[in-house]
Image: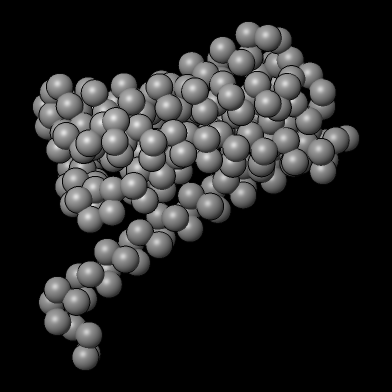
């Protein structure tokens, strides 16, 4: 764990450039789910707890980057539709995610936009789907996504910050606890989503009485 700890703290350091790195990774993560934006924000929160960064600026950078990235993904979907989805969401799993997002947007779009920001795979599918189905941009997408970006930034940044405060003498423990909590929350959200899909399937097939 010491090597991982050392690498993270070298990458997310107390330099002013770190705010730009956090913003850039949060933006790219909205298009490329493999980009470790959440890891960067959590680590920046830990560094802020040590007094080397401003937690307020970390949260602002993360929120601005997330909001900009989500909006970019929305407009990619709006302009290129399913062609863009096929490029970004390859495979059967990606297609199922897009179909699920399109259907759920129609039923409760605002809630989906907020919750999907916490699910890396669901995030890009939802934003692309919102653009593809031309979900109302200024009236609905922008305000909901602004809330989602702020919530996500606060969740990741403050998770790292309070973890850093709790383990001031052991940075790797702070990172480990913060990452474990973040993974647990993501798994819980995905589990709830899958459970809801299962319940709908049961109702659709008329298996309630079995």
Task: Confirm whether residue 127 shows in the render.
Answer: no
Q: Where is residue 15 in the image (x, y as percent from the top left)?
A: 71, 10
Residue drawn at (81%, 38%), measured in percent from left and top? 165
Q: Where is residue 96 in the image (x, y as percent from the top left)?
A: 19, 48
Residue drawn at (21%, 76%), measured in percent from left and top? 202
Q: Where is residue 158 in the image (x, y as percent from the top left)?
A: 67, 38
* Above or below for 209 versus 85: below
* Above or below for 11 versus 178: above
Name the image colouring.
Answer: one colour
* Above or below for 130 versus 64: below
Task: Give the camera-side residue of 208 and 94.
Answer: 208
Residue drawn at (46%, 39%), measured in percent from left and top? 147
Residue drawn at (56%, 15%), measured in percent from left and top? 21
What is the total number of numbered labels drawn onto the structure image?
0
Q: Which residue sits furthest bottom? A: 209
- Compared across the picture, whether 149 is left or right of 129 comes to right
Splitting the image into 4 quarters, where does residue 207 fall?
bottom left
- Compared across the picture, whether 205 is left or right of 187 comes to left
Where does the C terminus fall, quadrant-wise?
bottom left
Task: Confirm whether residue 114 shows in the render.
Answer: yes
- Compared across the picture, whether 144 is left or right of 51 comes to left
Splitting the image into 4 quarters, where does residue 166 fall?
top right
Q: Which residue sits furthest right? A: 169
Where does the N terminus fall, quadrant-wise?
top right
Q: Position of residue 177 (x, y in %)?
A: 69, 46
């Amino acid at each position: 764990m010491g090597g991982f700890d050392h690498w993270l703290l070298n990458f997310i350091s107390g330099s002013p450039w770190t705010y730009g790195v956090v913003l850039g990774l949060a933006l790219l993560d909205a298009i490329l789910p493999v980009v470790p934006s959440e890891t960067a924000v959590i680590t920046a929160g830990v560094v802020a707890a040590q007094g080397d960064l401003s937690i307020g600026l970390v949260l602002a950078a993360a929120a601005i980057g997330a909001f900009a990235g989500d909006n970019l993904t929305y407009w990619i979907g709006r302009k290129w539709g399913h062609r863009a989805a096929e490029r970004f969401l390859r495979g059967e799993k990606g297609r199922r995610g897009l179909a699920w997002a399109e259907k759920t947007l129609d039923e409760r779009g605002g809630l989906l936009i907020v919750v999907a920001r916490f699910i890396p795979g669901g995030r890009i599918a939802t934003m692309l789907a919102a653009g593809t189905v031309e979900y109302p941009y200024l009236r609905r997408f922008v305000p909901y996504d602004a809330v989602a970006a702020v919530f996500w930034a606060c969740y990741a940044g403050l998770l790292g910050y309070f973890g850093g405060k709790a383990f001031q003498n052991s940075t790797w423990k702070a990172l480990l606890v913060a990452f474990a909590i973040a993974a647990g929350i993501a798994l819980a959200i995905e589990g709830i989503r899958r459970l809801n899909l299962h319940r709908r399937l049961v109702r659709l097939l008329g298996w309630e009485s079995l």
